[in-house]
Image (cartoon, rainbow, N blue to C red):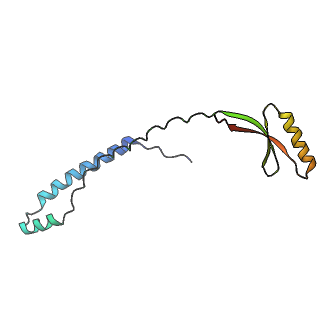
Amino acid sequence: MARKTVNRKELRAQAEAAEARSKAAPKKEKAAKEPKPKKEAKAKAVKEPKAPKAPKAPKAAAPKAPRKKAAKETRLKAYWGVFNPSMKRLVLFDYADKKAAEKKASELTASSKSTHFIQLVKEAITE
């Protein structure tokens, strides 16, 4: 469904006409009214609402958080781990000994009812 296009010129003309009417109307009313006694003027002055407050100044931007130091890169070493079905690591082999890890997994699978598998494990090097 297409929207109706807003004609800004017409809206501006309507706004200017409304301003002109509001400026002209109070002048006519003041001339037509009779002067009031001072007592009524004071009472009316007290009852009139106060002028709107000035807009508040914009809030200051929140202070920026200090930059965090870059995390120190930790060195990792790869291993082959032999796991049981509940993800418990049973044996750990060096990365170069993948054949030994596969052999151990097949032996454990043959000796028990559950299957065992190998998975790559990365651990941090402690110096």
Could you say where residue 117 lies in the image, as x and y percent from the top left? Answer: 84, 43
Could you say where residue 89 lies in the image, as x and y percent from the top left? Answer: 78, 46
The answer to whether residue 60 is above or below residue 44 is: above
Q: Residue at x 32, y 46 (%)?
A: 58
The quadrant of the image that shows the C terminus is top right
Could you say where residue 74 lies in the image, as x and y percent from the top left? Answer: 62, 34
Q: Quadrant of residue 31?
A: bottom left
Task: Left or right? Give the position of 78 relative to 7.
Answer: right
The answer to whether residue 33 is above or below residue 96 is: below
Q: Residue at x 21, y 50 (%)?
A: 23
Q: Nearer the viewer, residue 28 or 95?
A: 95
> Is residue 37 visible from the viewing direction of this image?
no
Q: Nearer the viewer, residue 60 or 27?
A: 60
Q: Residue at x 79, y 52 (%)?
A: 86
In the rendered image, the residue lying farthest to the top is 96
Task: Left or right? Give the position of 117 relative to 60.
Answer: right
Task: Left or right? Give the position of 32 relative to 112.
Answer: left
Q: Quadrant of residue 60?
A: top left
Task: Left or right? Give the position of 57 relative to 119.
Answer: left
Could you say where residue 112 lies in the image, as x and y percent from the top left? Answer: 91, 51
In the rendered image, the residue lying farthest to the right is 110
Q: Quadrant of residue 7?
A: top left
- For the image shown, how many numbered marks are present on the structure? 0
> Is residue 58 visible from the viewing direction of this image?
yes
